[in-house]
Amino acid sequence: MKKNDPDSTTIQNSHEATLNEPTRCHQGFRVGIYGWRKKCLYALILVLLFMVIVNLALTLWVLKVMDFSSDGMGQLEIVPGGLKLKGNAFVLENLIASQIRSRSGESIVIESSRNITLKSRDKHGHPNSWIHLGLDNFECLANNFEILDDRGYPLFSADRNQVVVGADTLQVTGEGGSRFSGGVQTRLVRAESGHDLRLESPTRNLEIKAPKELRLESRGGQITAQAQNDVSFRSEVGAIRLQSSSVIVPQLPTAKITNRPVAARSFDVFQLCACESGKLFLADPHMVCASENEDGFCR
């Protein structure tokens, strides 16, 4: 083929015209995207590009407003082993954490508009103890409850079997005192300085027992035992001792002797007599320590 051959030029132009024309199948249809379909495709691409740009702008705006960084988000900082919060935290639902601790030198405040509940679970996920702080009550559910001081010594301990107070002194400051439905076992019962000590049972008996020695001592006042009926002091083996410079038993009955001589004068000193039952009465010092039957002292 020559360089300037007219036939070669005609074939090349015909081939280029064929490439520029839309492709047609053997049935006479064109293959490709053209017309309104091409316009819709371009419009969809522009809409998607616009949405990508808007989404990217919103993402950057949220990152800026929330103050996201490589260390955390705003006042919430990611530290090794957990999260560090520099401000207040508002928990809308449940908060699950293994440890909550305040910053060094600052206090921690947990506040709720209704109530606060702290729960602990066992290895199976079941609650085994919890603390509930309501509007006007405080509830604790546990098998053992302890309060320790800064040295680790127990100040108060309670379980199903007993309640132990480990402090040196248990002080009850209420005006009504302290009420116990069962027994009380202690080594010392002492009132506060300047106040009286009163043991009272309004409707039933009051018993004070000791296996060895029972000692009632008042260093600056008096001891009063008062009852509606009888007051009994009983010793199974030993004796009951009243040791004092004077023992006063007022309001004892005096035996009347009808055959007293007329000239006999009355005395301020009497004999202290006792019946077989142990009942005490007074008699004249110069008469027989006895009473007449109508007195009824020894009945």
Image (cartoon, rainbow, N blue to C red):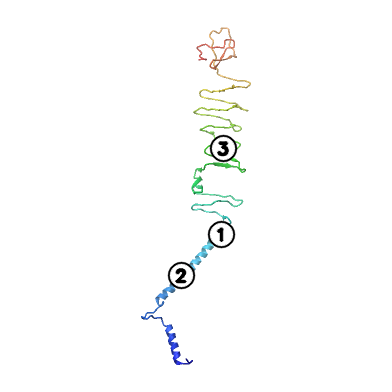
Q: How far apart are marks 2 and 1 (CA)?
A: 32 Å
- At x 56% / y 59%, what residue is drawn? 72
Residue placed furthest toward the right: 245
Image depth: mark 2 or mark 3 in front: 3
Image quadrant in which you'd find residue 233 = top right
Give neighbour class at mark 2: few <14, some 14-19, many 20+ (Cα, 10 Å): few
Q: In the rendered view, would you say 27 is above or below 97?
A: below
Find residue 252 and report its horizontal and vertical position in percent: 55, 17
The x, y position of residue 245, in whole percent, is 63, 21
Q: In this view, does 135 lie above or below 29?
A: above
Amino acid type for the residue under numbered disc 3? Val
Q: Where is residue 118 in the image (x, y as percent from the top left)?
A: 51, 47
Residue at x 53%, y 62% (from the top left corner): 65
The residue nearer to you, when weighing 123 against 14, is 123
Real-space CA distance between mark 2 and mark 3, rounded to the nearest whole angstrom: 74 Å
Q: Mark 1 and mark 3: span between their CA atoms?
A: 48 Å
Tell me the element at label 1: strand
The extreme left residue here reads 27
Q: In this view, does 216 lie above or below 125?
A: above
Q: Mark 2 points at which residue?
A: 48
Say whether disc 2 or disc 3 marks the residue closer to the N-terminus.
Answer: 2
Tell me which numbered mark, 2 or 1, is placed earlier along the sequence. 2
Q: Residue 164 carries which label?
A: 3
Label disc, if present, on residue 72 of the rendered structure = 1
SS class of the residue under badge 2? helix
Residue 131 visible in the snapshot: no
Which residue type carries mark 2?
Leu
Image point (52%, 64%), residue name: 61
